[in-house]
Amino acid sequence: MYVTRERALDPGAGAAALRDHAEIVDALYRFGLGQDLKDPALFASCFAADAELDFRPAAAAWGAAPPVMTGRDAIVATILGGFEGRVDTTHQVTNPRIVIDPDGGAPAGDTARLTALVEAQHLLTADRSVHALLKNLYDTDLVRDGHRWVISRVVIDNVWYTGDPAAIFGA
C-alpha cells in the first residue's frame, strides 16, 4: 500500500541510501518522460521484464475496465502503440515517498516501494480541444537492477480528472 512513514530516510543513512532514493524516483521519471517523448527505449527502461501495470482503479473513475498489463514488452507496446499518432502526453511526478526493503525480504535492500502523485495531460493530436487531465496516485513496487531501479508492479488510482478520458483511453 502507500508509503506513509514520517521520515524520508532511516537515521544514519548514508550516500548509498540517497543514491537509491534518486534512482527509485528516476524509474518513475523514465515512465513519464518515455511516454511524453514517445521513446520506447526510455519507457521500457523503467520496467522489469515481468512488470505488471494495473490501470483499472484509475479507469474505473470513468467506467472503463482495462485488463492488467503484464510484461515490459506488452506494457510498452500497449501504451505507446495505443497513443501513437493519436495522443500527446505530458507527465509531472510529485510527492514521492519511498521505503527500501518494505517487507524485510532477502536479499536486503533490493526491493522498494514508491508512492507518488502523477499529473498526466493527454491531448488528441488531431483536436487539442479533446483532452483528459488526470491526477493519479501511484502505488509502485520496484526491484534493484544493477545500479538502477525498475518497476516490478504499479497500481494507478485516480484522485480526480477533467476532460474526457473515454475519448483518450476508450470506454
Image (tube, grey):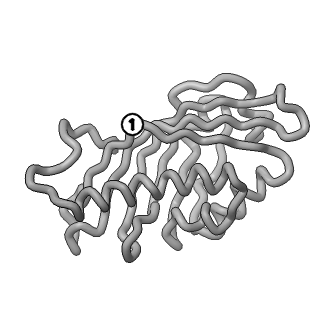
The image shows residue 159 at horizontal and vertical percentages of 51, 28
Front residue (pair 19, 167): 19
In this picture, is 99 found above or below 90? below
At x 40%, y 73%, the residue is 145
Examine the image and state in which quarter residue 8 appears. top left
Quadrant of image for the N terminus: top left
Residue that badge 1 annotates: 95
**In front of the other: 58 or 97:** 97
Residue 87 quadrant: top right
Q: What residue type is labelled 1?
A: Asn
Q: Element type at marker 1?
A: strand
Tally the marks: 1
In the image, residue 119 above or below residue 33: above
- Horizontal placement of 144 versus 151: left or right? left
Q: 156 and 64: which one is in front?
A: 156
Q: Where is residue 111 in the image (x, y as percent from the top left)?
A: 31, 64
Give the image location of residue 27, x and y in percent: 47, 58
Image quadrant of residue 105? bottom left
Identify which residue is drawn at 56% across, 54% down. 31
- 128 relative to 146, above or below: above
Q: Which residue does the image show at 26% across and 56% down from the upper left? A: 18
Left or right of 84 in this view: 26: left
Side of 146 relative to 61 (left or right): left
